[in-house]
Amino acid sequence: MKRSLYYALTVLIFLFAACNLTPGTSENDEEEQEDVDNEGTIDDAIANNSGNHDESSDYAWDEGDVESITLNGSSISESSGNVSVESGNVVINAPGNYSFSGTLANGQIIVNTDDDDDLVRLILNGVDITCSNSSPIYVKSASKVIIAVLEGTSNKLTDGSSYDYDDEEDEEPNAAVFSKSDLTVFGEGGLTVDANFNDGITSKDGLIIASGNIKVTAADDGIRGKDYLIIKDGTFNINSGGDGLKSDNDSDGTKGYIEIQDGNYTINAKGDAIAAETDLMIEYGEFELTTSSTSSYGSESTSTKGLKAGVNIIIDDGIFSLDCADDGIHSNETITINKGTFEISSGDDGVHADYDLVINDGDIDITKSYEGIESANADIEINGGTIHIKSSDDGINISAGGESGGGGAPGGQGGFGGSSSSSSSYCLYINGAYIYIDATGDGIDSNGAVEMTAGTVLVDGPTNSGNGALDYTSSCEITGGLLIAAGSSGMAQAPSSNSSQYAVLVKLRSTVQGGTIFHVETESGVGILTYKPSKKYQSVVFSSPDLKKGENYSVYTGGSSTGEETDGLYTGGAYTPGTLYTSFDITSMVATVQ
């Protein structure tokens, strides 16, 4: 089950659940999860998408076959039998190569050829075209159109704030560059689009941008390919009143996708920065994305996410700076991050998937979020990378049925929305990575299980007793790696006894101030861990491969260390003892010390 069919059934299942199931039931969630495909590679995702009109011959032509058209302000000079001038507009009536230069004060380039003809190539060689009541470039009918922006030229297209529609029923055209056919834009020159009415560049079929220096200011969406948007390379500066980059075919599950292969992107959007109806696939790129909204959370508002997809988000690599009013990265189904550098400031979740969320590598720094990394209805699997999270609620969360707490942005949660159900079949897998969490709510919260096999996890958890540094529903199995989670004691949990690596939960008699070292060493004085939580704490849970059954250990608070400190964890150096709190023996897989 994929895409549009999936969405329809999701709505029906939600209505059935609301009417017939008691709170806490996760039966439907589990059934839906079986139908969601996690396409972990871009090749997998491409195989499930269709439509790509790209051909190598699109980017080359014979200079001897070019027909030149000169724009002279209020007049047009041309000598081609395939071109007509009608009411101040240039109308292309046949396939071919057409070069444009000069200024057109109030007119259009209109392409109107048969759908089964060969392609039309519009070569922009330094133009400034304004059309006060419609699209400066309007592809009314064609098989395929190529817009070539010549190297060393500056080109500008400007429309008015109101249109006289050519097609009243469909209200078209409705963009400064508008095409009813497949459209490709490329070239090393500059293209500036001032879209005062609606969208900047729109194709109702597929849109490919192969290169160029493109600047778009749009009343609504910046660049939109309805069936698909493929960007090979280029430099993009987009200011949009709606979405920045968009593909939104919602009637064909193999379309509505965005593929980005490379490029530099600066996008300031009042809607989503990049939004795909189905898959969003990024091979590489450098992204500075900002989204903002004047609406307050808790009321219906425009979606203002950074990267958003209706099905899968797959990121192979890239450099991302995301400052978003809503989620930084959001998918209604799955997310796979294979590599990349991410700095995310979010008004809601840093990274949110309604279903499976996989992180294989990358440097992820979530500097602000409501919840840092969340799956609403499935698993989170972290296999590598370096991750820093600062959250006003949970750091890493499997909510198993929707939003796990109040205060999130509308649209920030998916699945079956608002349910507090849980399912032991969902799990947080940590198979590697370095993870540091600074959470006001739960540090790690799994409404299901936790399994940790390797890596380092440090949690500066909550200071209030209603949350825990480690919180799980069914089990927390530790077989390897280093886990240290400090926080309040009211909801403190230790790993479960099915672990194969020893763990200890220390509940202190009184609260210890932040910045005070917590140190554990063997009876012979060999340090097991030296950690300095940044906030006040009354419990510390830790699991380390250095813990041995039958050994005696001492717990100290305070003191100092000459070791190298990273996120509160000291390595190397010598520890100068503070106050001996207690000593204990390891006699079982999990020891509780009070």
Image (cartoon, rainbow, N blue to C red):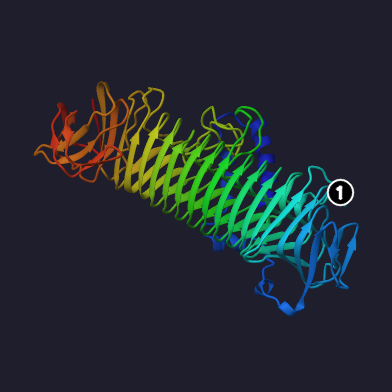
Q: Nearer the viewer, residue 546 or 459?
A: 459
State the quadrant of the C terminus.
Answer: top left
Q: How many callouts does the rendering have?
A: 1
- The residue sitting at the right extreme is 87
Residue 515 in picture, x, y percent from top left? 26, 29
Helix, strand or loop at label 1? It is loop
Query: Relative to the observer, which residue lies in front, 427 or 108?
Result: 108
**Amino acid type indicated by mark 1:** Tyr
**Residue for badge 1:** 165
Judged left or right of residue 508, residue 383 is right
User: Based on the displayed image, in which of its 4 quarters is residue 128 positioned?
Assistant: bottom right
Q: Is residue 7 above or below residue 86?
A: above
Q: Is residue 192 visible?
A: yes
Task: Answer with left or right where residue 495 lies relative to residue 343.
Answer: left
| Residue 73 screen position, x and y as percent | 81, 57
Report the residue that reaches farthest toward the left.
524
Relative to 16, is 22 on the left or the right?
left
Q: Residue at x 80, y 67 (%)?
A: 69
Residue for point 71% across, 48% down: 194
Residue 1 appearing in the image:
no
